[in-house]
Amino acid sequence: MDAYSSETGNSITLSRPPVLLAASSSTAMMRAERTIDAHGLRIGARLPIEEALARIKTQPSATAVWLELDRDCGSDMDELLSQVSHDVSRGFYAGVISVTQPLLDAVSARIDDLAIEIVVEGDEAQRAAALTIAVAAHGAPFQLSDVAADRNAERLRQLSEEVSRIASTLARLSSGPVMSRPALEPMTGADLPPLSADTVRNVIRARRLRARFFPEELFADPAWDMLLDLLQAEIAQLRVPVSSLCIAAAVPATTALRWLKTLVSQGLFVRRADPHDGRRVFVELAPEASQALRRYFSEVGQVAAI
């Protein structure tokens, strides 16, 4: 996987800076190449993880950096992830990281910038959507090539709707933060009746049972599922890593991560570094979110809150 510049034969002109690819194996590199090629973007370099950090530090400019990780590359991977997070936060380029499920916690621990798109074992449409979102957020929108669009049209439409729903939620929260409503002010945490972990656990179990009778995608509500999971963990005094929270969301991990970013950006969730493991972060409820959930359970009482 030697680095080299590449030519382009599509509608994207050479005036746009290239995309730099870094991968943990030859197989991973080939998969990343297919995604970039489908977008008609120019590949500036193909790099092994061990060499990518030095190249990125000296690269004059790039449209995006794509990291394809299918194995743990240790400290080289950690340093590269930290550098990419630093650069994206300063607007140097867009960032996309494709990972396998076992690497999710190690990667999440190093990524501080919410603009970076993380794809977890995604299909081609999810990968295409991640690159589109990342580059557009960086301020350089582009159109997917006709071939890729035809091949994944329906899946991309679904992903576009998914991202739009997240964006709409973010816009609503931004225009009027739920936690600042005057109706929440009179009651303090001490005024709330006790809430048991079993109560919340039963609600979660009831939600999961629906999948026995109906297609699970009919009831996808990742934000609520994650809120419930963190409330249950808080009551039981348990810590929840990113990977576990994504499982609790009951949607594909890539979708769960987008919701997680939204909820963190709105101050409902808080990321905490694991003091005993630098390659893991925990997620917990912000105090205001915890109080709001407890108020909710207090008001619904014995009604099945599903």
Image: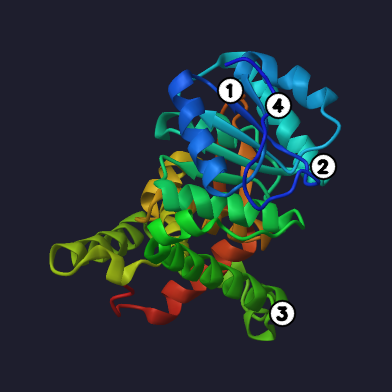
Query: Dot 2, how many residues are within 10 Å of its Cα: few (below 14), some (14-19), or many (20+)?
Result: some
Which comes sooner in the sequence, label 1 or label 4? 4
The type of residue carrying mark 3 is Ser
The residue tagged 2 is 92
The residue tagged 3 is 175
Q: Position of residue 158 (x, y in %)?
A: 42, 67
Which comes sooner in the sequence, label 3 or label 1? 3
Q: CA distance from mark 3 to mark 1?
A: 38 Å
| Dots 3, 4 in contact, CB < 8 A | no
Q: Quadrant of residue 49?
A: top right
Query: Dot 4, how many residues are within 10 Å of its Cα: few (below 14), some (14-19), or many (20+)?
Result: few
Q: CA distance from mark 3 to mark 4?
A: 45 Å
- Residue lying at the far left of the rendered structure: 213
The residue tagged 1 is 276
Query: Dot 3, how many residues are within 10 Å of its Cα: few (below 14), some (14-19), or many (20+)?
Result: few
User: Is label 4 in a helix, a strand or a loop?
Assistant: loop
Q: Would residue 254 be visible to someone looking at this image?
A: yes
Q: CA distance from mark 1 to mark 4?
A: 42 Å
Q: CA distance from mark 3 to mark 2?
A: 29 Å
The type of residue carrying mark 2 is Phe
